[in-house]
Structure formats: structure tokens, C-alpha cells
């Protein structure tokens, strides 16, 4: 049975290809950049793994999100097995959905105001305690993330040509969570099981903390930093992990990463749910399990279950 990997960024795929080759998986990439869907035809038999990224529009793929929605509607209408299916798309592309879902599940998220359009930004920001940060609702790659320590500096930014327009028109005004130590933690899960946790250095990395190998290269293909921003958080165990696994099950996030901050005031604040998770090569060398390897094993299990039901 063929595995179809649905995505739009070939630069992120090599670690998965290596893992799939090692596992002897029969796989094929479907690049959701352009093409067509014959709605009167049936999709091929197989397993479909959705890896849509909320940041696809930053790679000149503005239609990939709606293309993915359409493809997954078609696949699920024909009862094909999709890993990280149609409902997961909406979680990936909306931080509003992530934050409201986390809060409803009992996981603390940062206090946030979602502002539609630009006209109401200053009025809403006046009611948000400083410091605060801005974010894009459809983000990734640190899009639109800036810290403001006072309203005057935000007004200068919001009324200038430097203001970054979010692709869906929704800007988030979010409390700045002061970390107890200068890092965030990301918990990786596959098949509703804990894989490992990593730390990301916020002192050096700021808000742009993509762990993929391709993200640590500059435009000329050279490393951005002599030392990686990411490290394995060895033997990390915390009740938050079980909360993340429960959240993943509730929302059918079969492969996901959860990012949180241990705040200086003692809170554990989760601010991001990522459903097209990438893995850092330096961490992978030290980790007790391989992220792509665990995905390959999970997809093999799904393939066996699907084949048995056929």
C-alpha cells in the first residue's frame, strides 16, 4: 500500500524520505502547489499523510491551504485513511483555534486579543498590559512576532509601512510571557505517544525558532549560527506531557509538536500547536528515539491496520 505525503515544501522532506527508505515504505510525494482534482474520480488506494504548513504563503504558495482543504475533502469523502486529516488543517492554520481549544481543554494559554483588520489595533492595544507581543493568526517562522514595551512604540509600528499585514487579516495582541530561563520547550508526539522534548534558545533565536535543518541555513546555504539553537531536553517528564497527549487524542492530532514557556511567575503557558512538525538534526543525533523514525513506524502500523480492514 502506497503512502502519499501531502505537502508543499520539498526542503523539509529529506529526513522523512531517509526514514521511509530505511523502513522500506512505498511512498510518493504529492506537492500541493498547483494541479487539479477530478471530483468524479476515486483517489488511489493508500495512506495519506497531511503535512500542510500555516506558513506556506511565505514560500509563494498562497493557494496551498485551500488546495489541501479540497484534496482532504475529496479523500475523506472516499473514506481514504488520512493521517492528520481535514479537521487538523484548521488547527494548523489558526492560532485562534489553537488557543481557544487549549484553554477549553484546561491547558493554560497566553492572554490574547484577536484583532481583525488594522483600524481597531490601537484601540484594542490600549487595553492590553505591556509588555505584549504581536503575532499573525496564520503564522509560522515567527511571522509578525514583535515585542512592544509601551503603546507609543506599538503605535509607531502599527501606523508605519513596516507593519506586517497578516495573510488572513487577523493580528494577535498577546501577553509577553517572561520565561524563567531563556528557552522554550517543544514536546514532540507521534501516534498519541511522547517522543522527546527539545529546548530552543530564545536569547539567540528570538521568536524565529524553526527546528528543521533547512531553517538553520541562510540564503547562501551557510549555517546561521555556529551552535544550534536547539538541544535535547533529556529525561523531561512533566504532567503537561499527558495533557498534550490527551489534547492530541481529542483533536485527532496524530503527529504534532507543542510549544510552551515555563514562566518566571511559575505558570506553564502553551502558545503553539504545530501539526507539520520538523525535527532538528543535532537533536536527532542524541535523542533516544528518532522523530522521523517514529513517524515511519506509526505509518507502517496504520498501513497494516488499513490493509487488514480492506
Image (cartoon, rainbow, N blue to C red):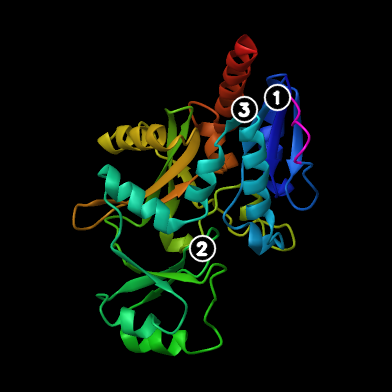
Is residue 299 rendered to the left or right of residue 29?
left
Secondary structure character of the magenta stretch overall: loop
Residue of label 3? 79
The residue lying toward the viewer, choosing from 97 and 208, is 97
Which numbered disc, 1 or 3, marks the residue that appears first in the sequence? 1
Q: What element carries label 1?
A: loop
Residue of label 2? 142
**Rendered-image quadrant of the C terminus:** top right
Q: Is residue 78 above or below residue 272?
A: above
Number of labelled discs?
A: 3
Q: Residues within 10 Å of mark 1 (few under 14, many from 20)?
A: some
Residue 69, percent across and down? 62, 48
Residue 210, percent across and down? 55, 53
The residue lying toward the viewer, choosing from 13 and 282, is 13
Q: Residue furthest left?
A: 265
State the separation of the CA atoms marked 2 and 3: 36 Å
Residue 275, percent across and down? 52, 43
Q: In this view, does 74 lie above or below 299?
A: below
Boundaries of the magenta span: 39-45
User: Residue 37 — which label?
Assistant: none
Quadrant housing residue 42: top right
Q: Residue at x 54, y 47 (%)?
A: 89
Is residue 198 rendered to the left or right of residue 54?
left
Residue of label 1? 46
Amino acid at each position: 500500500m502506497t503512502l502519499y505525503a501531502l505537502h508543499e515544501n520539498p526542503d523539509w522532506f529529506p529526513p522523512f524520505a531517509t526514514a521511509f527508505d530505511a523502513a522500506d515504505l512505498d511512498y510518493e510525494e504529492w506537492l500541493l502547489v498547483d494541479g487539479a482534482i477530478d471530483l468524479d474520480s476515486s483517489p488511489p488506494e493508500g495512506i495519506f499523510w497531511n503535512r500542510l504548513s500555516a506558513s506556506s504563503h511565505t514560500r509563494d504558495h498562497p493557494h496551498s491551504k485551500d488546495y489541501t482543504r479540497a484534496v482532504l475533502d475529496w479523500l475523506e469523502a472516499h473514506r481514504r485513511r488520512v493521517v492528520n486529516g481535514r479537521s487538523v488543517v484548521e488547527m494548523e492554520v489558526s492560532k485562534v483555534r489553537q488557543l481557544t481549544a487549549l484553554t477549553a481543554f484546561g491547558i493554560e494559554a497566553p492572554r490574547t486579543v484577536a484583532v481583525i483588520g488594522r483600524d481597531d489595533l490601537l484601540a484594542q492595544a490600549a487595553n492590553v498590559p505591556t509588555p505584549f507581543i504581536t503575532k499573525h493568526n496564520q503564522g509560522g517562522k515567527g511571522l509578525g512576532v514583535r515585542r512592544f514595551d509601551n503603546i507609543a512604540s506599538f503605535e509607531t509600528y502599527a501606523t508605519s509601512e513596516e507593519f506586517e499585514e497578516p495573510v488572513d487579516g487577523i493580528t494577535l495582541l498577546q501577553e509577553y510571557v517572561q520565561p524563567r530561563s531563556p528557552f522554550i520547550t517543544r514536546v514532540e508526539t507521534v501516534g498519541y505517544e511522547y517522543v522527546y522534548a527539545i529546548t530552543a534558545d530564545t536569547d539567540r533565536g528570538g521568536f524565529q525558532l524553526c527546528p528543521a535543518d533547512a531553517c538553520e541555513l541562510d540564503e547562501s546555504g551557510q549555517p546561521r549560527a555556529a551552535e544550534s539553537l536547539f538541544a535535547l531536553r533529556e529525561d523531561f517528564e512533566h504532567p503537561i506531557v499527558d495533557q498534550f497527549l490527551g489534547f492530541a487524542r481529542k483533536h485527532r492530532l496524530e503527529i504534532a509538536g507543542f510549544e510552551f514557556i515555563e514562566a518566571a511567575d511559575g505558570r506553564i503557558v502553551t502558545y503553539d500547536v504545530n501539526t507539520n512538525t520538523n525535527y532538528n538534526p543535532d537533536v536527532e543525533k542524541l535523542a533516544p528515539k528518532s522523530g522521523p523514525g517514529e513517524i515511519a513506524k506509526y505509518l507502517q502500523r496504520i498501513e497494516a491496520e488499513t490493509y487488514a480492514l480492506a
